[in-house]
Structures are given as C-alpha cells and as structure tokens.
Amino acid sequence: MEKKLFGTDGVRGVANIEPMTTEMAMQLGRAAAFVFKDDTSRRHRVVIGKDTRLSGYMIENALVAGICSMGVDVLIVGPLPTPGIAFLTSSMRADAGVVISASHNPYQDNGIKFFSSTGYKLPDDLELKIEDLIINHRLDELRPIADEVGKAYRISDAIGRYVVFLKNTFPKDLDLQGLRIVLDCAHGAGYRVAPAVLTELGAEVIPIGVAPNGTNINEGCGSMHPEVMAERVREYRADLGIALDGDADRVIFVDENGAEVDGDHIMALCGTELIKTGQLKKKTVVATVMSNMGLDIAMKKAGGKVIRTAVGDRYVVEEMLKGGYNLGGEQSGHMIFLDHNTTGDGILSALQVLSIIQRSGKKLSELAQVMTSLPQVLVNVKVRKRADLQDIAPIKKVIDEVEAELGDKGRVLVRYSGTEPLLRIMIEGENQDRIDTLADQVAAVVREHLGT
C-alpha cells in the first residue's frame, strides 16, 4: 500500500495547511496513542519534543490533546534534538516518542515523526496502520471518559539528562582541552545542548545560531549553509567547525581551513578508524544510494565495504539492524552509531570525530584525506506532481542517454524527495564540467514536462 500522509521522515508540510494542520495533528495523536497502547491496565506514556519553530506550539498542543483523549499520558520536554527524544523515550520506558520538526526545512514548514518504545523510527507497516485509523475514521467512537482520560506532564530536566548521555559516549580518557570549535546550531533544537556538551568536555566554543526566535531556524545558517561557519573558522583561527541542522540529527564539518567535510567523509574517517581498532562490525558501513563512490573506494582500501539502501536514515537503520552493523549514514550528515544511539545524532557524531582528532593528534583536514570524492552534482527541480518517470518518454530518453555516456565510470540517480515537492538529479563521473552539463540537460527536460 502507498502511504498518503507519511513520507520518508514522518508527516511534513507547510504548517497550518494540510496535512500539517492542528486537526491532523490531533488525529495523528489519537491514532498513535491507540497503536501504542497494549491490553494492560497500566498507564501508557508518550514523550513529545520539538524544535524551535513558531508553529511548534500549536502542533504540540494539538498532539497532546489527541493523545490524552485516547487515555494516554504525555511527557512534554520542549525544544530538544530529535535523537534526544529517541534517547528519552527509551530511557524513560515510554511507549512512544513524538518529534515536532521539519528538520532542515525553512521555518514555515513543520512535521511530526514517531519513535517506538525502543527509540527507533516506525516501520512502514505501523505508519500505514496509523494512516488507516485516521483516513477510515476507525477511532471516532472510541473516547475514554472520567479518570481514563490522559494527563500531561512537563519534564524539566530533559536537557540535563541528554547532556549527560552525550558526554558518556565520549571516551573517558579524553577531553576537548586545546580545541577551539566554531559551533553553528542553526537556531534550532540543539542550541542549548550542543554548546553545553562541548564546553563541559573542555573545548573553547564559539557559538553561532543559538538565538532562536521561532522564524530564524535554518535561515542562512546551520548544516544547510556551512559557508557561514567556514568564514568564522577562518576568522577565529579555529581548529574546526561543526554545523547542526534544525533538529540536530545531522552534522556537517569544516576543517581548520574552512573546507567542508560532509557525511561521506565522516563515515570514511570513522569507518576506517573503527576497522583499525576492530570495532566496525563485519567491516561494513551502511550508506544510501546518494553517497559518493569515493566512500566505497576508501572502505575497500581499508579492508571494509559499503552496503547501500534507499534514501532516508530510517532505511539505513533498518539495514543496520537486519545485518548486525554498527555504523551507517548519509552524505547529508545523518550518521548512526548504533553502539550509542538508535537514530542519527549530530552532536553524538561530532563527539566521535572529535575523539579521533584528540587521540590521533591530527588536524581534521589530514584525517579527511582518507577519502577522495568523485566529481558529483546534485540538481533539484521543483515539480507539480510525482509522475512515474518511466511513463514520460522524453525524460526516460535523456536519462538513458546520460547513463550510456557514463558507462561504468559514473552513475545517474533521479528520485523524488520524500519531504519536499522536488525531483533530485544526482550525477557522478570523472569530469565535473561534463556532469554539470549532463545534469542541466536532464533538469531542462524535467522542467519542461513536470516543472511548476
């Protein structure tokens, strides 16, 4: 069955427009509460957290109302990184966790995503079950009354709990003394946690993007705009820069020269280091189809390999659990260290890289040389609908022609975004100018037949 509400990372859209309305948020709360309740008479509990978007207030209240109306209690933690909600859901033995966030999207967007009691994102079948309950009005008559209605509690020490958890993932015999770090929190959910963690571990932190006002999340800052952080690194002669996105589940670095170090390089860096120490399970890194072929080359050279999945960190995690792997991620900066947390965690990932820097005594620029990226281009085309590309002859023809030209010395990946009305065109090859031209050719045909 095709999902109608859920995308690759929960339900997402412009806040106050379908499907991201308060009415839908309440329905999602009711349906999720029903799904996560078991047959026991105990009180059930759901953790709710959010990022710093203005619309988070109304969506949070609607979710709380929906969940309580089904006889389930709510634990409200306020602004906290998405992986922090996953951690708290598991550590507090809650039945589920809910995050209100649109991640790296602009502030007018928002989203709702769910975690199970174990801290993992929901599989497709559970999301379909929630959709079915809403679309077919299966819960309309089910309304607990009297003392069976749920209660809401605010958890005041959530940030402290998560800070302690993060610090405990850093090696006990190391600290961050001597490191000057530019930290860009994107005016998002990590604006309090991330500076606290790095400072308490001994780093000199130069924070930016730590003054959220409800409308400035991701605006010209954070992992979507690492050039801002790079400029500050050069200005302050820092050792490196760390940029989070709006919900702090992804991270992008720049080295001491201001050069970007993306998720692929971080996976190569951490993967090869874990092979050296015998800690990379099955000597395998799990990545998505979007990761650069240079990652495969780097891991093979280190005696390891790469397994690829569909785009979306949830699919990376599913493959890691199925195959018994402990490191995976995406080029965009989602990194999953399953030995420590159940989902992508930008701050935790940064700490793993910082531990390698401190133990090796090397600069990030030197460590990042473990991988050389093949030339790659990504072009996004805004589309009015999601048509099957195989059914549009001119689009299929131009893609086939590009694939034939590249042969085994490159690749083409054309896919719809799971969170925005975009068609993403990614091409890798030996020559940057040529693949730029090829990507523009594909994009031009897509705009002609599917563009807005």
Image (cartoon, grey):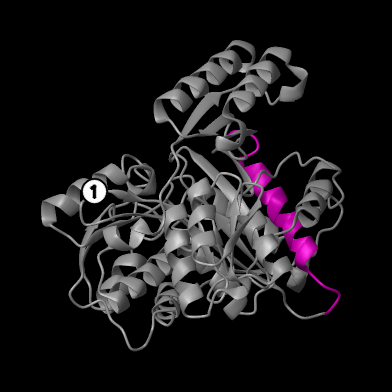
What is the x, y in percent for residue 420? Answer: 57, 34
What residue sits right under mark 1 in the picture?
230
Looking at numbered disc 1 in the image, what kind of residue is underneath it?
Ala
Q: Residue at x 43, y 41 (%)?
A: 107
Label 1 crowd bin: few (<14), some (14–19), many (20+), radius 10 Å: many
Verify whether residue 29 appears in magenta.
yes
What is the x, y in percent for residue 168? Answer: 42, 83
Residue range (magenta): 16-40
What is the x, y in percent for residue 207? Answer: 23, 59
Can residue 107 be seen?
Answer: yes
151, 402: nearer the viewer: 402
Which quarter of the figure has residue 374? top left
Q: Residue at x 59, y 24 (%)?
A: 405
27, 444: nearer the viewer: 444
Does residue 394 lie above or below 350 as drawn?
above
Q: Main secondary structure of the magenta part?
A: helix
Verify whether residue 222 appears in magenta.
no
Does residue 58 lie above or below 353 as drawn?
above
What is the x, y in percent for residue 161? Answer: 45, 79
* Image quarter hosting the C terminus: top right
Does residue 299 lie above or below 439 as drawn?
below
Which quarter of the figure has residue 135? top right
Can residue 102 be seen?
Answer: no
Q: Residue at x 53, y 32 (%)?
A: 427
Instruction: Describe the element under mark 1 as helix, strand or loop.
Output: helix
